[in-house]
Image (cartoon, helix red, strand yellow):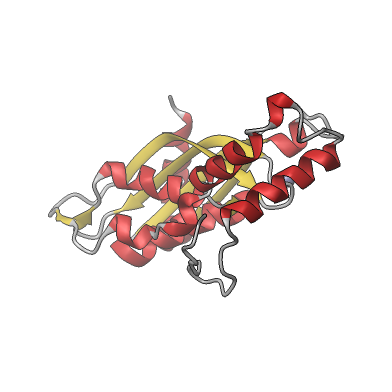
Amino acid sequence: MDAIVKTFPGQSETRPTREQAEEAVRVLLRWAGEDPQREGLLDTPKRVATAYRELFNGYELSPEDVLGRTFEEVSGYGDPVLVRDIPFYSHCEHHMLPISGKAHVAYLPNGRVLGLSKIARVVDIFGRRLQTQENMTAQIAGAIDKTLKPRGVAVMIEAEHMCMAMRGVQKQGSTTLTTTFTGEFKENATEQARFLTLVRNR
Ligand SMILES: [Zn+2]
């Protein structure tokens, strides 16, 4: 029995119990046409509930905590720092079906730099929430902007949406591309072009 009642960050609803979550999975199994009492499905609600806690644990983590408030000081390095091809998985908020893709994140340091693994962790936190690709792109840029206060941030996400690939539209293999630019990346066309070149030239 899950007795812990937790309020999610930014949400007023309290979390349902594990029993309630497992019962909801049984309802969906019946909705799909299955018999939840079939032997192969007996433990499925338990597994799904556990998997959801892992796949959506981004609600329990704050990007600000990961990025921290202390950064490495660098003097004299003003060129972009780019982390390319960060793989991620997420779920679309419209169908709760998987999104898989890669994020490319760059920033222009303002005397301070981030540990490189932290950028990948921020991508992971936002990925482990229900998302639209547009929002996720903006959220990654916003979190880095807010904590590191660089001269600019550029984020590009290339992703495939299972709700497009598997459902009626059947656009298998098609990827959606989104970008967000802030600061000098937004204002300066040369910086923007340099980012796009760095991402593309692999
Ligand atoms: Zn969708």
Residue 57 x/y as whole percent: 47, 50
Residue at the (40%, 50%) spot, across then down: 122
Q: Is residue 112 visible?
A: yes
Q: As rendered, which of 43 and 161 lies closer to the eye?
A: 43
| Residue 150: image location, x then y, percent | 31, 60
- Marks counted in the figure total 0
Single out the residue that lies furthest toward the bottom. Answer: 12
> Left or right: where does residue 29 sit relative to residue 176?
right
Of residues 73 and 4, which is closer to you in this image? 4
Image spot of residue 99 (x, y percent): 62, 38
- The quadrant where ligand 1 appears is top right
Give the residue drawn at x 36%, y 39%: 83
Residue drawn at x 57%, y 52% as measured from the top left: 18
Q: Residue 96, relative to residue 182: is it above or below?
A: above
Which quarter of the image is occupied by the C terminus? top left
Is residue 182 rendered to the left or right of residue 134?
left
Q: Is residue 173 visible?
A: no
Rendered location of residue 120, percent (x, y): 37, 42
Query: From what the image shows, is residue 22 above or below residue 188?
Result: above
Quadrant in the rendering for residue 72? bottom left
